[in-house]
Amino acid sequence: MRLHTPVNSPNSSPEHHRRPLPPLISPVQFTAPGIRDADMAIMDPNIEPDLMKLWNLVGELSEQLSHTKQVVSSLHNDSIKLKAQALHNETGFVLRRFNLHLSQEEYDAELERMNATMAAENQGLQYDNKQLNSLLKEYEQTLDSVMSTFRKRAHDVQLQELETIKLYESLLVSSETAALSEQLTADTSVSFVFAQCSRRLRMVIRLLGGERPRTPSPSLTPPLSATKDVDDDVPRGTLETRCESELSHPEAFDWALEREIELARLEKENAELRMLLQAGAQADAASASAVQPLTLPRVPLAAIKSLMPRRPRTQGHSSFSSESSSGEFHAGHYLSHTDNQELLDMSDEVL
């Protein structure tokens, strides 16, 4: 026997069970529409048994219908009671006022049974909770071990990648350093060769210009084979010393250029003088054919030389300044004896 709780509902009220049945149709009222009482009196007496049978069937059907309604209402009330009992069984909340139909002993026994069932269910739930907690701890431990292994592996892989990157960077830096050192060695060798070539070229230009070239010191002119291994045999300070020694006297490198400029200027002046002499000779020839030439006093050669333009004497070069200071060397070199005589005659005529 289980505890149940009656629930008041409109279908379970006593008034619902005492609802009056619909009134039955009496034989007097059961008449066909449109038939009057006079017609009923004239009806055939053989129809009365059939009408009685029909009336009996209608009565039986009415009784069955009322019984069916009672059964349906009782079933509905039972379903409501079962729903309420199931609800109270689920919640475990049972009140004495809902179980007044039971005795105190039955109520206590049922209550103890319910309490024992709930205690057993609680114990089962506690056991399930313990099992779930243990499974959760095992899962956390497994996850922690897996993550630690993964972190360790990732750390090892990262260290390996960093070592590989560092190795390749060192290789790249060493290769770039080697390439730059080789390029620097080649550039230094080429520049040293160019310096030697320029020195030799200056010596040749000096020889062509008539100047005795300076004797190169052994420290400044190493053999050509020594330029192949500059970094191994020749220290870096040697090249700087050579460059400084060559650049310390810039005037020594310009004397050949100045000499050539002076020669070109004197050639231009000689050409202009020749043109003037030719023009004077043509004028003399024309005047001699027409008029007797005049005799002019002769001008000394020193006066003519004093009239010629002079270039300022260059400081620091005795050989060049001695030849080009007064213009005597170039005038005697480029003017022949006939030209000098014509120049003197022209000067006498002008004076």
Image (cartoon, rainbow, N blue to C red):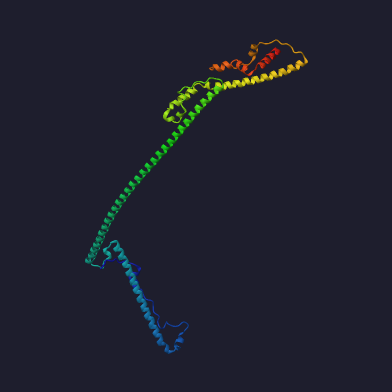
If the image is split into quadrants, where does the N terminus sit? bottom left
Residue at the location (71% across, 19% down)?
279
If the image is split into quadrants, where does the C terminus sit? top right
Residue at the location (38% across, 82% down)?
57
Instruction: Point out the residue furthest to the top here.
Output: 297
**Residue 313 in view in this figure:** no
Which of the pair 302/91 is nearer the observer? Answer: 302
Task: Tell whether 123 sits left or right of 269.
Answer: left
Q: Is residue 167 above or below residue 107?
A: above
Residue at the location (30% across, 65% down)?
86
Task: Tell whether 131 sits left or right of 40.
Answer: left
Residue 293, image quadrant: top right
Residue 3, image quadrant: bottom left
Which of the pair 275/163 is nearer the observer? Answer: 275
Residue 83 screen position, x and y as percent: 32, 66
Q: Is residue 252 above or below residue 1?
A: above
Residue 302 screen position, x and y as percent: 64, 11
